[in-house]
Image (tube, rainbow, N blue to C red):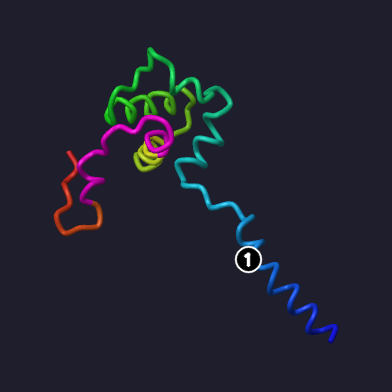
Amino acid sequence: MRILLLAWLAASALPALAQTVPAPQSRGALLYATHCIACHSTQMHWRDKRVATDWASLRAEVQRWQGHAQLRWSEDDITEVARYLNERHYRFPPPAERLTRGTASTVAPS
């Protein structure tokens, strides 16, 4: 009887545990949280005079600031952080290569 009770408790606790485990963060979110959040609050991205006005300028700002911080991020890292910021704050239309990713008609990088 005791084993059945323990089995029932364990089985009923699993769904609750699964709901409390946070979803894994994207690489862009992790890089931003590790290297950028100390100086950039959410208000930085919502201010009226923000420099980023579209996807290209957002990516350029990420590239510029990672250079100032001497982070030596790869192009993929820069893109991932820009993608994270765009999804989280800006909502600029995505670049063409993101629209066709995973399809046979991918756009060649320029």
**Residue wearing tag 1:** 15
- Identify the residue at image location x=81%, y=84%: 3
Q: Tell me the magenta residue range.
A: 84-100
Relative placement, left or right, of 98 versus 85 is left
Residue 39, quarter of picture: top right
Image: 9 above or below 70: below
Asked whether residue 92 is drawn in magenta, I would say yes
* Tag 1 secondary structure: helix
Residue at coordinates 80% horizontally, 79% vertically from top-left? Answer: 5
**Residue at (47% x, 27% y) in the render:** 70
Outermost residue to the left: 105
Where is residue 24 shown, x and y percent of the image?
53, 52
Identify the residue at horizontal 41%, vertical 34% (top origin): 85
- Residue 110, how many percent across, how many down? 17, 38
How far across and down, in percent of the image, does residue 4 sit?
78, 84
Q: Check residue 25 for magenta coloring.
A: no
In this view, the residue in front, 32 or 74, is: 32
Above or below for 103 versus 49: below
Tell me the chief SS of the magenta region.
helix
Question: In the figure, is residue 101 to the left or right of 41?
Answer: left
- Of the residues shown, which amino acid type is indicated by label 1? Pro
